[in-house]
Image (cartoon, helix red, strand yellow):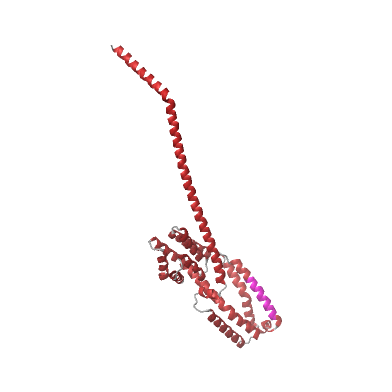
């Protein structure tokens, strides 16, 4: 009885196995077809997904390229405007007086120059010099010294501006990060900044009040402070207004760049100080020797000032000295 049960179980197991093998044989092609179909569908879906991703990437690249072209065009326009403006500014005395922080008009400047030249002419005549020498001294005193003094004031004011401008940018960065808009940050510098930065930012605020946009108002600051640092600031504001972006980060980077430029300028000045001292000594040596000879033997040196040949020698010497000074000045001056 037990042996018969085992036989029946074995028969049922073999029958089930045979049925399963027959079903698999009959359904194998269908199962493989379904697998291939499913695999093909997955590949098609992944391809569509890849195409959509590639299309989105192409769209992003095209958008970035359009934005880059827009920024480049804006930079070119700003550069052309700045070049035209710098040429126009450099040719006017009124702009120089404004850059020096002087409130006098051109007419008053010319009047003061003429008075100073006449005074120098009278002093030269009283000192016993000839009319031609006195006229030359009057020309230098009336036409050269006032303009040199204005240039000195312009340079000093620009140096003060460069010292305070990075600090003003840092204040703007902290103001913008705290939630203030750009216009309020500009007003903050115009109210609490140090001179001459406060005056220039006050001009920006006043320009906004009469209807100018912030980029145009910042670009106008180049008229009174013709520096590359001001040009950088105007470009950053213009790009941010057109293309957007993190303004606080851009201004922070600009502040860091300006500080590094100032350090590099100071390093170059220190390295070229020896050459500048040599140029100053060589340039002052003829005048010192002439003064010493005049104090020890005035009759010996006065021939140069009283004889026509001495005048010719002085003129040629002055020309050669001027050429040498200009050459040495170009050798020791570097644009950073």
- The x and y percentages for residue 306 are 68, 84
- The x and y percentages for residue 123 are 59, 86
Inspect the magenta stretch and tell me whether residue 136 lies in it: no
Q: Is residue 220 left or right of residue 23?
A: right
User: Which secondary structure class fits the magenta region best?
Assistant: helix
Quadrant of the rendered image containing residue 81: bottom right
Is 53 situated above or below 146? Answer: above
The answer to whether residue 336 of the structure is visible from this angle is no
The answer to whether residue 72 of the structure is visible from this angle is yes
The residue lying furthest to the left in this view is: 1
Q: Is residue 311 left or right of residue 37?
A: right
Magenta range: 310-325
Q: Residue at x 30, y 14 (%)?
A: 5
Camera-nearest residue between 222 and 167: 222
Q: Is residue 43 left or right of residue 282?
A: left
Camera-nearest residue between 239 and 45: 45
Inspect the magenta stretch and tell me whether residue 324 lies in it: yes
């Amino acid at each position: 009885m037990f042996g018969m049960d085992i036989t029946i179980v074995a028969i049922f197991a073999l029958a089930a196995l045979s049925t399963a093998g027959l079903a698999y044989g009959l359904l194998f092609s269908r199962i493989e077809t379904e697998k291939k179909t499913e695999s093909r569908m997955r590949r098609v879906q992944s391809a569509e997904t890849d195409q959509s991703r590639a299309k989105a990437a192409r769209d992003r690249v095209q958008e970035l390229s359009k934005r880059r072209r827009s920024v480049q065009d804006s930079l070119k326009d700003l550069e052309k405007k700045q070049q035209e403006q710098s040429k126009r500014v450099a040719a006017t005395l009124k702009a120089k007086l404004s850059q020096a922080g002087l409130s006098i008009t051109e007419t008053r400047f010319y009047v003061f120059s003429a008075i100073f030249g006449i005074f120098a002419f009278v002093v030269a005549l009283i000192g016993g010099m000839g009319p031609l020498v006195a006229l030359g001294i009057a020309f230098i005193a009336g036409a050269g010294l006032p303009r040199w003094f204005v240039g000195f004031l312009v340079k000093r004011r620009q140096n003060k501006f460069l010292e305070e401008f990075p600090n003003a940018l840092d204040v703007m960065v902290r103001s913008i990060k705290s939630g203030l808009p750009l216009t309020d940050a500009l007003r903050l510098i115009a109210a609490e900044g140090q001179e001459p930065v406060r005056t220039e930012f006050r001009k920006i605020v006043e320009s906004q009040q009469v209807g100018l946009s912030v980029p145009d108002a910042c670009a106008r600051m180049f008229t009174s402070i013709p520096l590359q640092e001001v040009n950088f600031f105007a470009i950053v504001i213009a790009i941010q207004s057109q293309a957007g972006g993190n303004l606080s980060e851009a201004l922070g980077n600009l502040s860091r760049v300006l500080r590094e430029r100032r350090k590099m300028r100071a390093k170059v000045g220190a390295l070229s100080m020896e050459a500048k001292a040599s140029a100053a000594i060589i340039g002052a040596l003829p005048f010192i020797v002439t003064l010493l000879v005049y104090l020890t033997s005035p009759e010996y040196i006065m021939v140069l000032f009283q004889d026509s040949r001495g005048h010719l020698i002085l003129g040629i010497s002055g020309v050669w000295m001027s050429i040498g000074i200009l050459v040495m000045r170009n050798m020791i001056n570097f644009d950073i």
